[in-house]
Amino acid sequence: MAGSTDTADPPVVSPPLWLLAELTYRCPLHCVFCYNPTELERAGAELSTAQWVDVMRQARAMGAAQLGFSGGEPLVRDDLEELVQEACRLGFYTNLITSGVGLTEARAKRLKNAGLDHVQLSFQDSTREMNDFLSHTKTFELKKKVARIIKDNDWPMVMNCVLHRHNLPHVGAIIDMALELEAEYLELANVQYYGWAWRNRDHLMPTREQLEQAEAVVQRYRESIGKRCRLLFVVPDYFEERPKACMNGWGSVFLSIAPDGLAMPCHNARDLPGLQLPDVREHAIADIWQRSQAFNAYRGEDWMQEPCRSCDERHKDFGGCRCQAFMVTGDAAATDPVCSKSPRHERIVQFTREAATRRHIPLVFRSDPAPSRLGGNLGEKCS
Ligand code: SF4
Ligand code: SF4
């Protein structure tokens, strides 16, 4: 049996507020910073429509109110409209997180009729050349058309662009593009080093000067455009002295369900050692949330080591990110090494220092295992 829900006395925990439904790992794009697992062949077959509906009903009954349809590319699922319709009937506020590939006018109408509330559209850059290079697909013009379709359907649009050393100098042009496409929000999220981005970190890591210049540009735009488009600039953890409150605390508000039905407190948790990830086909969502080993492993403070255990800031950041702690230190329960109080913080400083002098090495584009394993066609790469 996958996972375990046999904790003797379930702790009293608040219900999840966010359900992240990663419908599929399939995606027509091949982004060099994709946060999906690099070893997708370890994932099982996708949940069926009925199984997703059951997950949504259980999560909503517990109190979850926000639902993100994500992936991979969720539009590759033919049943997306059916899932959106059921989510809306249940009372979720629904958000589609998409590369735009597959959002035709006809499909947008059907999703609108199904009740979809919100769309988040990703771009890789403001230039066709860089957008298409980083995703290894010819998708730039298509994404612009999709932005128009989103506006024509009166959806609030969040435009998202992952930033790194290759596109940070374009941040002003990216904001201009968002204004031209009438995005309500622009999320300029500097790459976090998980999944494919971890594999490509030597190539993606910016310099501190690049970051400071980009942040200054964003601030100037904020002052000039006001509320026309809200700009969110997320500084990469590696350049901070304190970690972010990852997932707002483990098992606190986020419930993520992977395409193969494994439930996780964070969508990157698959790679953490020692976690018995429960399968929604075998366990009720309430049991998973309240009783499972995986959701209780880093909940609260009992698991913390020093210096977090006695730190007066532990209620702010909950010790940081477990995945980052594991990837950099080899110990998932260690203090996040981004924190300057961590005894392993020097490794992070070293990563960032080397950014300015790094040799050019080849980027690794996201690839997928055989389509049959993931349940469908993965689309064509551009040549
Ligand atoms: S980051 Fe790129 S490759 Fe990964 S799921 Fe999103 S669009 Fe697809
Ligand atoms: S020692 Fe731990 S709790 Fe304290 S600031 Fe650093 S990561 Fe946060």
Image (tube, grey):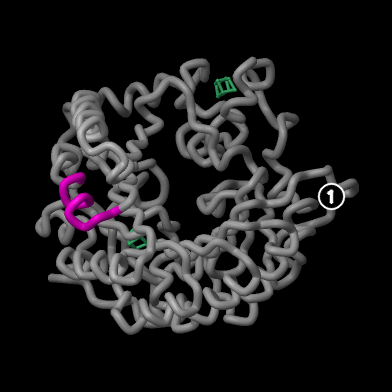
Tell me which corner region of the image, top left, top right, bottom left or bottom right, holds residue 232: top left
Vertical placement of 242 versus 303: above or below? above
Residue drawn 65% across the image and 70% down it: 90
Residue drawn 83% across the image and 43% down it: 11
Q: Position of residue 136 (x, y in %)?
A: 20, 63
Question: Badge 1 is on which residue?
Answer: 7
Question: Is 181 colored magenta in this rendering?
Answer: yes
Residue drawn 29% across the image and 79% down it: 104
**Which of the two residues, 220 or 4, is positioned nearer the viewer here?**
220
Residue drawn 48% across the image and 22% down it: 339
Q: Is residue 325 visible?
A: yes
Vertical placement of 59 versus 321: above or below? below
Left or right? Give the position of 13 relative to 262: right
Q: Quadrant of ligand 1?
A: bottom left
Rate crowding at label 1 as few (under 14), some (14 to 19) or many (20 or more) other CA atoms within 10 Å: few
Q: Position of residue 52 (x, y in %)?
A: 61, 74
Ligand 2 neighbours mark 1 (CB distance < 8 Å): no
Q: Quadrant of the N terminus?
A: bottom right
| Number of marks present in the image shown | 1
Vertical placement of 360 versus 350: above or below? below
Magenta stretch bounds = 175-183
Q: Secondary structure beneath disc 1?
A: loop
Q: Residue furthest right?
A: 9
Tell me which corner region of the image, top left, top right, bottom left or bottom right, holds residue 193: top left
Mark 1: amino acid: Thr
Left or right? Give the position of 207 relative to 91: left
Q: Main secondary structure of the magenta part?
A: helix
**Which of the two residues, 49 or 4, is positioned nearer the viewer here?**
49
Q: Position of residue 340 (x, y in %)?
A: 46, 17
Q: Is residue 355 visible?
A: no
Q: Quadrant of the C terminus?
A: bottom left
Q: Position of residue 53 (x, y in %)?
A: 63, 76
